[in-house]
Amino acid sequence: MKTLLVIDMQQAWLESERFEKEQVLARIEFAANQIRQQQGKVIFIQHCNEQAPSGSAGWQLADNLTVTTEDLLIDKTACDSFVGTSLLACLTELGTTELYICGLATEFCVDTTLRAAVSAGYSVVALSDAHTTGDRPHLTAAQIVEHHNWVWQNLAIPQGQQLQVRTVAEAFPTDLKSTSS
Amino acid sequence: MKTLLVIDMQQAWLESERFEKEQVLARIEFAANQIRQQQGKVIFIQHCNEQAPSGSAGWQLADNLTVTTEDLLIDKTACDSFVGTSLLACLTELGTTELYICGLATEFCVDTTLRAAVSAGYSVVALSDAHTTGDRPHLTAAQIVEHHNWVWQNLAIPQGQQLQVRTVAEAFPTDLKSTSS
């Protein structure tokens, strides 16, 4: 089963400036709909800390992301979404074969969860234009997004596994047959 | 027990240009000696692939790193030093409490192993001036080293754990008592 992990797309972390924020939100919404249409599962990961305790306004997901009753929601407190959570058990129960990853922040929770997923044995698709971050003292958000996409493309992964870095359009190509016929 | 992980400081990966190569080698040699003097353990991780098969010239450790009969050597094939290796079993048997991490390449095996060590429950000290990489198409090696040091300093780690980012001089302060008395 294809599973989409949407990491930390919460009010508290979307208040500030984020690289291509509106486009990233729209691409995640599109990817989630595609996954649902393909009978896959959408899992929203939500980070909880003193700034955004579970249930608080800041902890809520972005208004313009659709959450259906079929989706799963998992709280976490560390950058690695597998630590102290039911994520691994959920993926095992779902029979996840391909894990699509998107969300924020690129260099923290997205990157850590992606590397952990590869180490846990999953074939991973990093959605290269559906993760975001903010400008940092030393690099712009655009540079950080570019850097981590490049790192993931060149990572030495365990034999027999796949780690693909693809745009949302590449990962979920629109079916043109219906209009071209 | 304090344990130092020296990641991939091998001939094959040190042939090309590396940020502060000689200084990084000297700092790692110093850190390793300090760890040995403190009854800690030094573990050299060696990456094996088609460019540097186990036992080949390229797979050998850098000439100017001392390896003692007390040190451990562990081969790996993926960026995460815990995957497909005896590293976790070794650390458990050693009773490792603090894990010091250095080596190359910053954004690949060092970063992945560091995040995996934190997720595995270890208190980690990233030696901020004892890891290195090369210039990449999008960023210089110096920018990449700075970026990952910054990321590790700001990573949301599991409660009760520590992730410190310290220079070798900070992590192993020279004992001035003998000269000042």
Image: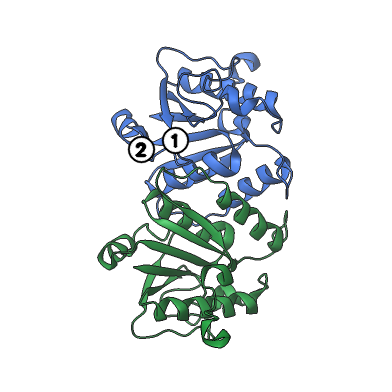
Chain colours: A blue, B green
CB under 8 Å between callouts 2 and 1? yes
Q: Dot 1 surroundings within 10 Å: few (below 14), some, or many (20 or more)?
A: some
Viewer-proximal residue among B76 and B174: B174
User: Which residue position holds label 2?
Assistant: A84
Amino acid type at image mark 2: Gly
Q: CA distance from mark 2 to mark 1?
A: 8 Å
Amino acid type at image mark 1: Thr
Instruction: Find residue B26 and report its image quarter.
Output: bottom right
Q: Residue at x 37, y 33 (%)?
A: A87
| Element marked by disc 2 | loop
Q: As drawn, is B130 to the left or to the right of B97?
A: right
A8 versus B93 height, above or below: above
Q: As drawn, is A100 to the left or to the right of B71?
A: right
| Residue B177 image position (x, y, % from top left) | 52, 82
User: Which corner quadrant holds the N terminus of chain B?
Assistant: bottom left
Q: As drawn, is A72 to the left or to the right of A109?
A: left
Q: As drawn, is B149 to the left or to the right of A119?
A: right
| Residue A143 image position (x, y, % from top left) | 72, 46
Residue with the most extreme top position: A69
User: Which residue position holds label 1?
Assistant: A77
Q: Is residue A171 visible?
A: yes
